[in-house]
């Protein structure tokens, strides 16, 4: 804890905390995407994957607590850096003309806040399974798949939950919007991560900036392919 406290005493330290926590969260986003894309392999694959996670609390809870810590440190360092920047320039520009900065970089704090709200909704929607948020009138907790002759005899039907959940255009539309903001945030954050860690120089800068944008677009396409496919009829047999 003393190490973290010392890091927060300087702007460089806070940027380093943002970079490290951001890299962990970035890897989680990719890993989570790989897991979710198993929905295209059919009910057996995604339900088996979900059951593995749910039946191993000794793995999932340390991971959740670590991610929660990473999110907290990331938000705290971003907020304090923003406050320091404002304090250093108490009077705004008469005419603001951004040079060499992207829309994503100029709105990282606001975009990050919106992304945080989106993540909270996602957790309440699919992890906590709060019924009134899914707009279907159904309880996702009741979606089970029977496994005759096996132990346990049933498991949570993740496939049906995802299909039912994304069958609502309003919900899917909100997810697409939230993912667009998340990937906009990632497109700048991934590039800034190398800068803060001292791994970025003028020779590699163009490549890293372009790679960050490409990866962000691929992540967006990967995640949004699920609600879009479901709205187009994929998995409709689960609605019966």
Image (cartoon, rainbow, N blue to C red):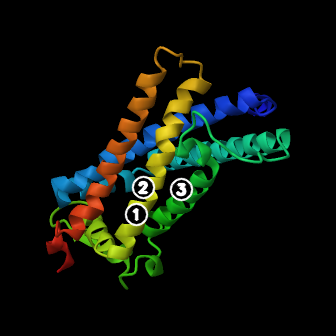
User: Horizontally, is 119 left or right of 6 in the view?
Assistant: left
> Where is residue 65 shown, x and y percent of the image?
57, 48
Q: CA distance from mark 2 to mark 1?
A: 6 Å
> Which residue is tagged 1?
175
Mark 2 surroundings within 10 Å by alpha-carbon count, few (fewer than 14), some (14 through 19), many (20 or more): many
Whether residues under marks 2 and 1 lie with C-beta atoms below 8 angstroms apart, the answer is yes
Question: Is 40 above or below relative to 7?
Answer: below
What residue is at 47 percent from the left and 75 percent from the top? Answer: 130
Residue furthest front in the image = 95
Of 71 and 112, nearer the camera is 112
Residue furthest top in the image = 203
Question: Is 20 above or below relative to 25?
Answer: above
> Which residue is tagged 2?
179
Residue furthest bottom in the image = 137
Q: Looking at the image, can residue 152 be seen? A: no
Q: Which sits earlier in the primary sequence, circle 2 or circle 3?
A: 3
User: Horizontally, is 101 left or right of 45 in the view?
Assistant: right
> Where is residue 158 shown, x and y percent of the image?
29, 64
Q: Looking at the image, can residue 225 be seen? A: yes
Of 80 and 238, nearer the camera is 80
Q: Which sits earlier in the primary sequence, circle 1 or circle 3?
A: 3
> Where is residue 132 shown, x and y percent of the image?
46, 81
Q: Quadrant of residue 159?
A: bottom left
Callout 2 secondary element = helix
Callout 1 secondary element = helix
Q: CA distance from mark 2 to mark 3?
A: 8 Å
**Label tally:** 3
| Screen quadrant of the N terminus | top right
> Which residue is tagged 3?
115
């Amino acid at each position: 804890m003393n190490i973290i406290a010392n890091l927060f005493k300087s702007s460089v330290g806070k940027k380093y905390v943002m970079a490290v926590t951001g890299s962990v969260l970035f890897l989680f986003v990719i890993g989570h995407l790989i897991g979710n894309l198993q929905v295209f392999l059919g009910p057996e694959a995604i339900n088996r994957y979900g059951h593995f996670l749910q039946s191993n609390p000794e793995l999932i809870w340390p991971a959740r607590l670590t991610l929660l810590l990473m999110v907290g440190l990331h938000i705290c360092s971003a907020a304090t850096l923003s406050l320091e920047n404002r304090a250093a320039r108490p009077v705004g520009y008469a005419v603001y003309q951004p040079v060499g900065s992207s829309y994503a970089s100029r709105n990282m704090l606001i975009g990050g806040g919106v992304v945080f709200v989106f993540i909270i909704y996602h957790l309440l929607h699919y992890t906590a399974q709060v019924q009134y948020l899914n707009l279907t009138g159904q309880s996702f907790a009741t979606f089970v798949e029977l496994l005759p002759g096996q132990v346990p005899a049933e498991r949570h039907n993740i496939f049906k939950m995802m299909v039912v959940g994304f069958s609502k255009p309003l919900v899917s539309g909100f997810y697409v919007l939230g993912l667009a903001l998340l990937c906009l945030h990632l497109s700048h954050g991934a590039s800034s991560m190398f800068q803060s860690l001292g791994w970025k120089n003028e020779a590699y800068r163009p490549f890293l900036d372009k790679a960050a944008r490409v990866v962000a677009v691929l992540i967006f396409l990967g995640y949004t392919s699920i609600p879009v496919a479901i709205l187009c009829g994929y998995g409709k047999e689960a609605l019966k």
